Image (tube, grey):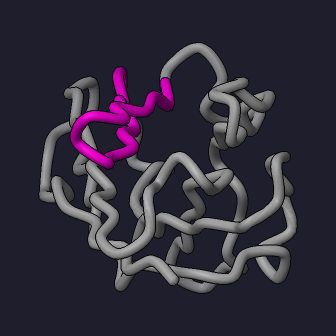
Amino acid sequence: QVQLVESGGRLVQAGASLRLSCEASGRAFSDYAVAWFRRAPGKEREFVAGISRSDGIWPYADSVKGRFTISRDHAKNTVYLQMNSLEPEDTAVYYCAARSGLWVRIEDDAYDYWGQGTQVTVSS
C-alpha cells in the first residue's frame, strides 16, 4: 500500500508557472504507474498527465500539451507536475493517483490510491 500527499498548489496569475509535488510513503513509488488528474469547479475529474512504472510518459491531455511536464524522482519517492504558461482554465483541484499496473490509464477508476488534492487557482 502507498500513501500520497500532494503539495505546491496556490493562487497565481495567468502566465505564471507552478510545480506540484506528489510524495509517496509506504511502498516504493517505483512500483506504480502514476497520474495527475484535476477537477475544475462544476466539471468531471479529468486526466492530465501520466508516467508509467518504467517512467514512460503518457500523452498529455490536449489542454495541457506543451505546457505541462510530468517527471519522477525515484530517490525522493516523488512525482512532479511542472506547469508553465498557466491559464485561468487550469484552475482546479489537482490530484495525484497511483495504480499497481505497469501502464498509465486515463480512466480515474483504474487507480487504487489517491492523494487529498491541492488547489491551483489561476487569476486572469
Q: Where 123 falls versus 53 (above or below)?
A: below
Residue drawn at point x = 82 percent, y = 82 percent: 109
Left or right: 7 in relation to 103: left
**Residue 88 in the image, given as x and y percentages of width and height:** 39, 48
Left or right: 16 in relation to 68: left
Q: Where 117 falls versus 54 (above or below)?
A: below
Q: Where 119 falls versus 53 (above or below)?
A: below
**Residue 36 in the image, given as x and y percentages of width and height:** 55, 55
Q: Who is closer to the viewer here, 15 or 30?
A: 30
| Quarter of the picture holding the C terminus | top left
Residue drawn at point x = 30 percent, y = 70 percent: 25
Left or right: 48 in relation to 25: right
> Which secondary structure dominates the residues rendered in magenta?
strand
**Residue 74 in the image, given as x and y percentages of width and height:** 36, 35
Residue drawn at point x = 70 percent, y = 25 percent: 57
Residue drawn at point x = 60 percent, y = 66 percent: 98
Left or right: 18 in relation to 43: left
Q: How many numbered markers are drawn?
A: 0
Rendering quarter of residue 39: bottom right
Q: Who is closer to the viewer here, 63 or 25?
A: 25
Q: Who is closer to the viewer here, 28 or 94?
A: 28
Q: Where 67 falls versus 122 (above or below)?
A: above
Q: Who is closer to the viewer here, 53 or 118?
A: 53
Rendering quarter of residue 11: bottom left
Q: Say if the magenta span includes residue 83.
A: yes
Q: Say if the magenta span includes residue 79.
A: yes
Q: Which residue range is magenta in the image?
A: 69-86
Rendering quarter of residue 112: bottom right
